[in-house]
């Protein structure tokens, strides 16, 4: 791969990284009691807890919902990142990048 092709690939990867920073996945657990937004870089953007749907006497349930929501947010965020990074991970070289 020439230095020019390498430079193109680096530019494309930076572009994808910027897209991932702007990509937001949202998940919920406990029938909407907990909502989490996470970027494609797996940074937590927002956490919402609906007090109307949470039983303060059952904190264990809220903890489970939070755990489930974070697990799903990470999974979905990773899936988004993997999809956007596919062209760089395949064996097709720069042809997959449209360069």
Image (cartoon, rainbow, N blue to C red):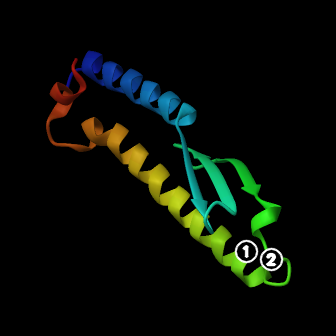
Q: Which mark is residue 28?
A: none
Residue 60 left/right relative to 99: right
Disc 1 crowd rating (10 Å Cα; few below 14, some 14-19, many 20+) is many
Mark 1 or mark 2: whose residue is earlier in sequence: 2
The image position of residue 76, as x and y in percent, is 46, 54
Give the residue at the far right of this rendering. 56
Residue in view at x 42 percent, y 44 percent: 81
Towards the viewer: 95 or 27? 27
Q: SS class of the residue under badge 2? A: loop
- From what the image shows, is residue 15 above or below residue 63? above
- From what the image shows, is residue 29 above or below residue 12? below
Hey, which quadrant is residue 86 in on the image?
top left
The image position of residue 59, as x and y in percent, is 79, 80
The image position of residue 47, as x and y in percent, is 72, 53
Disc 2 crowd rating (10 Å Cα; few below 14, some 14-19, many 20+) is few
Residue in view at x 56 percent, y 35 percent: 21
| Contact check, label 1 and label 2, Cβ < 8 Å | yes
Towards the viewer: 54 or 82? 54
Residue in view at x 56 percent, y 31 percent: 22
Residue 52 left/right relative to 6: right
Residue 31 left/right relative to 55: left
The image position of residue 33, as x and y in percent, is 69, 63
Report the number of numbered marks: 2
On the rendered image, what quadrant is the N terminus found in?
Answer: top left
Q: SS class of the residue under badge 1? A: helix
Q: Which mark is residue 62?
A: 1
Hey, which quadrant is residue 84 in on the image?
top left
Give the number of the mark in front: 1 or 2.
2
Q: Which residue is mark 2?
A: 55
Towards the viewer: 49 or 79? 49
Residue in view at x 46 percent, y 27 percent: 14
User: In whole angstroms, how far apart are the C-alphas of marks 1 and 2?
Assistant: 8 Å
């Amino acid at each position: 791969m020439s230095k020019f092709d390498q430079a193109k690939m680096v530019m494309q990867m930076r572009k994808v990284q910027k897209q991932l920073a702007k990509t937001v996945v949202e998940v919920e657990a406990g029938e909407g009691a907990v909502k989490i937004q996470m970027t494609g870089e797996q940074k937590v953007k927002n956490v919402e807890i609906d007090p109307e749907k949470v039983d303060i006497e059952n904190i264990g349930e809220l903890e489970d919902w939070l755990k489930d929501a974070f697990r799903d947010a990470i999974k979905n965020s990773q899936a988004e990142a993997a999809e956007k990074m596919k062209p760089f991970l395949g064996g097709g070289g720069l042809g997959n990048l449209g360069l």
